[in-house]
Amino acid sequence: MSIKREVDADPRPGRFLLTGSARLLGLRDLPDALPGRSETIELWPLSQGEIEQRPDGFVDAVFRGGADINIRASRFRRSDYLDRALRGGYPEAVHRPTHRRRARFFESYISDLINRDVKQVSDIERPTDMRRLLNVLCGRMSGLLVIDNISRDLGLPRNTVKRYVDLLDLVYLVRRIPAWSSNATTRAVATPKLLVVDSGLGAHLAGLTPARATDVAAPIGPLLENFVLGELARQLSWAEEPVRLHHYRDRDGVEVDAVLERASGEIAGIEVKASETVRADDFQGLQHLARKIGDRLIAGFVMYAGREVLPFGDRMRALPMSCLWET
């Protein structure tokens, strides 16, 4: 109430900065949400561009130039992308030089968040169940968020799982990427995709270490997809125009990892591949979407762990993942 009175008396912007690790409107003991008097700014973990002091302008460039944006060959290899995904973007983790020291930070961060911040938002009966759920979610990063399946695997009631996922979203650990559909894609499924906000934290909780990441059986694909989706989501918070992030999947299993939609209706589709090579088959989902929506699709990209920019037909390009922060 004191802030409300001060703002009403002197409405100059920027006089107060209220910070927290949960969305302000989600706090159960909040006496007044300051409607019309506040602006919410979500702070993500650092983007790769912020870490490297690079432009982070991919999203804006796509909606200015479509598939013909100017992108150079990359110096990065697959191992470089893995290192970045495992490191994540929390400043404390970025500054720690070894995996062991980062792991200690991640463990402390999760423990404090569940035992302190989550309890500020809601009573949870068993914090250990929240931690079990978070481990399972990180093991399914960038996959479809099917509550019934998670409930069955954990042996927890469906309503409990849903409420706990909502709480993890509220404290900025996970995000739901909504499914995209239009009248032309009536067979699209409505299930959201799960994004772990920080890929380094997600990898840690999924048991992915630098040593294990070299194993051919390690789930590197989901990790790098989550990494790319996270970088896109960060850029949307400062893009020049409102752009929304979705994913696409239909009942036949055809999918596009990321669908960026501008308010005026133009679409850019993105597929993520963890390999250092790319094939025409990797564009099947994007080609399917192009046939469905026609000229609304201004560009289709396969982001991969290789170095070259490669054309694959009308509006289709293969791009190195580093284009996200070097464009």
Image (cartoon, grey):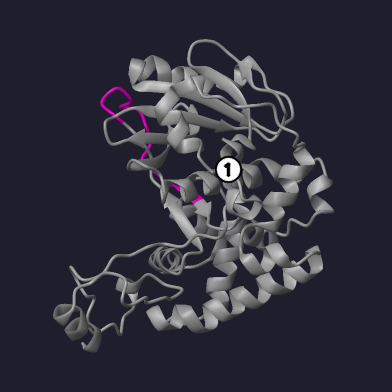
User: Number of labelled discs?
Assistant: 1
Quarter of the image where the N terminus is located: bottom left
Q: Reply above or below: 173 against 259.
A: below
SS category of the residue bearing label 1: helix
Q: Left or right: where does residue 220 sit relative to residue 316?
A: right
Is residue 205 placed above or below 277 in the rendered structure?
Answer: below
* Residue type, mark 1 in image: Val
Q: Quadrant of residue 228?
A: top right
Start-end of magenta stretch: 182-194
In percent of width and height, residue 211 lies at: 84, 53
The answer to whether residue 127 is visible is no
Q: Is residue 145 above or below residue 74?
A: below
Q: Quadrant of residue 101 in the image?
A: bottom right
Q: Is residue 277 left or right of residue 263?
A: right
Q: Nearer the viewer, residue 88 or 248?
A: 88
- Which residue is at 75% across, 67% downward? 96
Main SS category, magenta section: loop
Query: How packed is label 1: few (under 14 Cα within 10 Å), some, or many (20 or more)?
Result: many
> Where does residue 26 sit, x and y in percent of width and height?
33, 73
Q: What residue did someone put label 1 on?
A: 228
Give the farthest residue toward the left: 9
Q: Residue at x 34, y 16 (%)?
A: 295
Residue located farthest toward the top when viewing the structure as drawn: 313
Identify which residue, 323 or 21, lies in the foreground.
323
| Drawn side of residue 22 relative to residue 223, left or right | left
Q: Foreground: 175 or 1?
A: 1
Can residue 232 be seen here? The reply is: yes
- Is residue 323 rendered magenta in the image? no
The residue under the point 60% across, 78% down is 111
Magenta span includes 183 = yes
